[in-house]
Image (cartoon, helix red, strand yellow):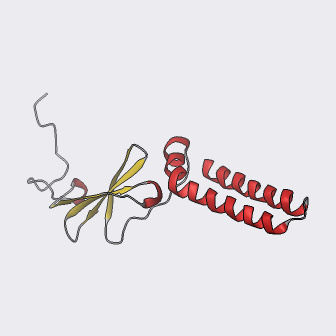
Amino acid sequence: MITYLYWLVLALVIFAALFGIGVRMGKWKPALIIAVIIWLAGTLLYYFWLEQIFVKRLGGTMNLEVPQGQQHIAATWKGDNLWIENYDPDTNRCIFREYSRGNLLEGQVVIKNCNPLRAGNGGTSGSAIPDGPRTPL
């Protein structure tokens, strides 16, 4: 919801610049230049700084897709950066990917021979879920 509110406020500021400078003062060229600068600055501000802050702290919206052929395992936050863990059954690897602000400096950790529990037969007993407690009660 906060994401939609941000874009609405940005659109209102652009409209106010066009109306205030273009219509009221009759100076359309400066009005268009200022509107484009506001739009560009607002878009860059959102994608390079505010997107993950809105999602984590204020209930914003962010969409990610699991790469083709992989299975999603987990997601966690480290600071303001989102880490996603996926499993690639073809190569038997667990891949942790970082989604940082603006998607510029992203990390990746690859665990080979991962065998996560969700993939089945990762343990030696043949069952990923134990039948009972490990120690007697």
Q: Is residue 1 visible?
A: no
Task: Spot the residue most to the top.
Answer: 137
When the figure is inspected, residue 118 is found, relative to residue 70, above or below; the finding is above
Residue 80, percent from left and from top: 43, 45
* Residue drawn at point x = 51 percent, y = 41 percent: 57
Task: Spot the residue most to the left.
Answer: 124
The reply, left or right, for residue 118 in relation to residue 63 is left
* Residue drawn at point x = 54 percent, y = 53 percent: 61
Residue 117, percent from left and from top: 21, 54
Quadrant hosting residue 33: bottom right
The reply, left or right, for residue 78 in relation to residue 40 is left
The reply, left or right, for residue 129 in relation to residue 56 is left
When the figure is inspected, residue 16 is found, relative to residue 29, above or below; the finding is above
Image quadrant occupied by the C terminus: top left
* Residue drawn at point x = 67 percent, y = 50 percent: 5
Q: Is residue 95 visible?
A: yes
* Residue drawn at point x = 31 percent, y = 71 percent: 69
Residue 9, percent from left and from top: 71, 51
Question: How many callouts does the rendering have?
Answer: 0
Identify which residue, 127 or 103, lies in the foreground.
Answer: 103
The reply, left or right, for residue 28 in relation to residue 100 is right
Identify which residue, 120 or 82, lies in the foreground.
Answer: 82
